[in-house]
Image (spheres, rainbow, N blue to C red):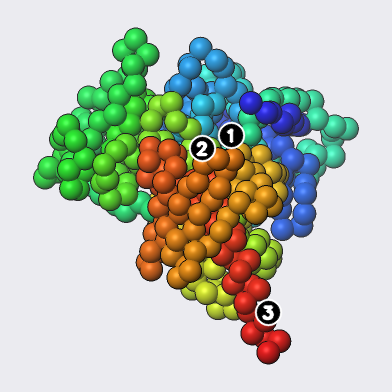
């Protein structure tokens, strides 16, 4: 697996210290993006956390996921969480090392009391001494929070005193893109009050038995959830329930549990589990299987394969401003694009880490990570294979437009697209996943050829 070296540079370690007005939590920032451009150590907030104990526990839960591997757990993972300031809230995000669990803590305006919240994205240092200090935060004393150093502190340092260089797998980079596509297909399926939420989550297994992977299904039953053996209507998939262990840290502060997922299908599916806290939301999104990371889901491939999405993404990108809630209709009006093209552009921007999705608000949000869409496109094997098929002239469109043949060596695959746009292929990949992990290379190649044919037809029509 290819890897990139990713460097964090902090002026000092994050820490909890004693202050005149109570404990002070200083989260140190690495290089990040802001409205003014790249900043070595940006400052996003200074003030108080309205509820210190649940906030400390939730930050630890995000750090737990960043340090965990739920598949092949003997391999260590260590990635510093990402923090995005959206002007009205702070979002802390992390991925597990295996890319199968995505964690996000949204600290809303009601959970913060201080100066204005800035705009931008960076990494925050989470070290072992900080983790130990956070476990000792109680509800009695006010907790001051600073995300980033102030200007005076920056001038006292000649350079970073804490540097971390970690190998960052390409599949981890693609996880941010895939989760926003996956979560955009979720709806709220169940909501439990505090007592039932605690009872249900504490009943889940803490770890797999002998490394066995488990997939459960649950259905709403009054004010609680009950297990079922198969994906009946209304059921939500709970793949690898032991992967919700990080939520145990915040249960005593929870006021509700919300469960999100797609319409139940024939097999395992991703789902999101949100614990509602005072002025905050902590959400864990699980991939469809413990051994199946988000990076291989293929939800972004359709947008990456189209030339129009690439051009549209450049236009949409200039309209984003770390908005906490991106309105598709508003972007469509500003850009002059259709809502469908705006969604495709946002999907493409997601491959550069610029777009996330908040299931609680059913809306996209803007962040800025140091990745580029070209990197994701170049490293995706299915997309590379599709481009190779097009370049080799392997795709032939049949009369009528619904059927296409793709010749690979001495094998011929047939790709059919119905009038509603649903695609099917005769290849083994499609037979195995039925589109559940994105389109196969043949379907991608056919889509590219159809787009090129449509452009050529438009050009001829315009010149007539």
Residue mark closest to the camera, 1 vs 2: 2
Q: Give SS at disc 1.
A: helix
Instruction: Quarter of the image for the C terminus: give it.
Output: bottom right
Name the residue furthest top.
210
Please name whichever residue, 371 or 445, is drawn nearer the observer in this view of the structure: 445
Measuring 42% from the left and 57% from the top, which residue is drawn there? 416
Residue 296: give x, y in percent of width and height: 51, 37
Q: Does the CB distance between marks 1 and 2 fall below 8 Å?
A: yes
Measuring 45% from the left and 61% from the top, which residue is drawn there? 403
Instruction: Quarter of the image for the N terminus: give it.
Output: top right
Location of mark 2 (residue): 296
Q: Does the CB distance between marks 2 and 3 fall below 8 Å?
A: no
Question: In the rendered structure, which disc, 1 or 3, sits on the residue that comes first in sequence?
Answer: 1
Residue 238: name its quadrant: top left
Q: Give SS at disc 3.
A: helix
Please name whichever residue, 181 or 333, is drawn nearer the observer in this view of the structure: 181
Name the residue furthest front.
410
What mark, if any, has residue 354 been given in the picture? Answer: none
Measuring 16% from the left and 34% from the top, which residue is drawn there? 228
Location of mark 1 (residue): 171
Location of mark 3 (residue): 459
Residue 335 vs 184, above or below: the answer is below
Residue 248: give x, y in percent of width and height: 35, 27
**Position of residue 313 in the picture relative to residue 358 (left or right):** right
Question: In the rendered structure, which disc, 1 or 2, sits on the residue that comes first in sequence?
Answer: 1
Measured Cα–Cα span from mark 1 to mark 2: 7 Å
Q: How crowded is mark 1: few (under 14 residues within 10 Å), some or many (20 or more)?
A: many
Measured Cα–Cα span from mark 1 to mark 3: 39 Å
């Amino acid at each position: 697996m290819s890897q990139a070296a990713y460097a964090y540079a902090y002026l000092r370690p994050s820490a909890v210290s004693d202050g005149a007005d109570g404990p002070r939590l200083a989260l140190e920032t690495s290089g990040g993006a802001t409205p003014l451009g790249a900043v070595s150590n940006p400052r996003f907030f200074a003030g108080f956390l309205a509820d210190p104990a649940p906030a400390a526990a939730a930050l630890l839960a995000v750090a737990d996921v960043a340090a965990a591997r739920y598949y092949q757990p003997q391999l260590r993972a260590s990635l510093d969480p990402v923090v995005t300031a959206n002007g009205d809230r702070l979002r802390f995000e992390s991925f597990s090392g295996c890319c199968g669990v995505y964690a996000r803590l949204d600290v809303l305006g009601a959970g913060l009391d201080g100066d204005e919240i800035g705009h931008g994205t960076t990494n925050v240092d989470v070290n072992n001494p900080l983790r130990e200090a956070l476990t000792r935060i109680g509800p009695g004393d006010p907790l001051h929070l600073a995300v980033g150093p102030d200007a005076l502190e920056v001038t006292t340092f000649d350079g970073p005193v804490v540097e971390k260089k970690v190998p960052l797998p390409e599949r981890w980079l693609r996880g941010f893109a895939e989760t926003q596509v996956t979560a955009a297909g979720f709806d709220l399926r169940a909501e439990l009050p505090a007592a039932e939420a605690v009872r249900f989550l504490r009943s889940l297994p803490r770890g797999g038995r002998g490394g066995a992977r488990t997939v459960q299904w649950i259905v709403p039953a009054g004010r609680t959830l009950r297990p079922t053996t198969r994906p009946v209507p209304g059921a939500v998939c709970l793949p690898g329930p032991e992967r919700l262990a990080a939520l145990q840290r915040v249960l005593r502060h929870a006021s509700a549990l919300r469960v999100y997922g797609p319409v139940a299908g024939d097999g395992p599916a991703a789902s999101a589990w949100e614990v509602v806290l005072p002025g905050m939301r902590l959400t864990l999104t699980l991939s469809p299987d413990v051994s199946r990371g988000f990076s291989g889901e293929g939800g972004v491939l359709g947008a990456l394969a189209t030339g129009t999405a690439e051009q549209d993404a450049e236009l949409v990108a200039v309209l984003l401003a770390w908005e906490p809630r991106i309105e598709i209709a508003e972007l469509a009006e500003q850009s002059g694009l259709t809502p469908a093209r705006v969604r495709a552009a946002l999907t493409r921007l997601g491959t550069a880490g610029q777009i996330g999705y908040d299931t609680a608000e059913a809306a996209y949000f803007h962040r800025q990570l140091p990745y580029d869409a070209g990197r994701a496109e170049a490293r995706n094997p299915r997309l590379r294979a599709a481009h190779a098929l097009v370049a080799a002239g392997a795709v032939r469109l049949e009369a009528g437009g619904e059927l296409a043949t793709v010749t690979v060596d001495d094998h011929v695959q047939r790709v059919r697209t119905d009038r509603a746009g649903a695609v099917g292929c005769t290849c083994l990949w499609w037979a195995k996943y039925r589109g559940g992990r994105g389109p196969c290379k043949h379907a991608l190649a056919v889509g590219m050829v159809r787009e090129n044919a449509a452009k050529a037809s438009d050009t001829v029509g315009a010149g007539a």
